[in-house]
Image: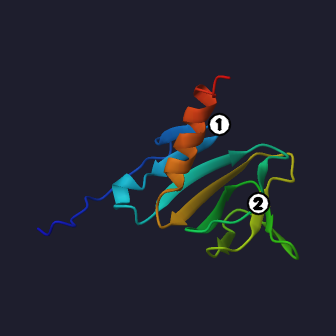
Amino acid sequence: MSESFMPISVVLPEEGTTLIGDIRCKISSAATNNQCTVLEVTLLAGQGAVLHQHEVEMEILLVQAGRCTVGDERNKWLLEVGGIAHFPQNTRHFFRNDHPETCVLLITAIPGGLDRFFEALAAQAENPAQD
């Protein structure tokens, strides 16, 4: 076996590590040798991510339940179950649940590392800076 051998990862629907809020890591960057991170994000009505961009990662978003509005400064699209959006690296984008039913997304970030970002946010929330 080569040194780069990585075992197969299998994650059942109820499994994963909660990072912060309703963001669950299904496959960590550590499990993929930093090749990707797979997150499950649950959005209640009105929740989502404001317009932002990633300098390092591209994202692929798959709607697993509900509906999700995605877009950029000029356009927006409504994705239903099975719909996919690709956000290239350095491309401003947003996603949000504009509907009353809960929306569940599977987000793959390439390369990995987005899980570490949310882990750091969670740690900061647990231990805010003391003045």
Instruction: Give the residue pinned by disc 1.
Output: 21
In the figure, is residue 52 to the left or right of 129? right
Location of residue 108 by image quarter: bottom right
In the figure, is residue 5 to the left or right of 101? left
Q: Where does residue 105 sit, x and y in percent of width and height?
A: 65, 55
Q: Where does residue 115 sit, x and y in percent of width and height?
A: 51, 50
Q: The disc labelled 1 sits on which kind of residue?
A: Gly
Local SS, label 2: strand
In the figure, is residue 84 to the left or right of 118? right
Instruction: Give the residue pinned by disc 2.
Output: 95
Farthest left residue in view = 1
Q: Residues within 10 Å of mark 2 (few under 14, many from 20)?
A: many
Q: The disc labelled 2 sits on which kind of residue?
A: Phe
Decide: marks 1, 2 in contact (CB < 8 A)? no
Question: In front: 11, or 37?
Answer: 37
Residue in the picture at 53% in, 38% down = 18
Question: In front: 24, or 4?
Answer: 4
Query: What separation in Å lies between label 1 and label 2 (alpha carbons)?
Result: 16 Å
Q: Where does residue 60 sit, x and y in percent of width and height?
A: 60, 68
Give the vertical position of 1 relative to 38 (above or below): below
Local SS, label 1: loop
The C terminus lies in quadrant: top right
Q: Earlier in the sequence, mark 1 or mark 2?
A: 1
Residue in the picture at 36% in, 60% down = 32
Location of residue 70 by image quarter: bottom right
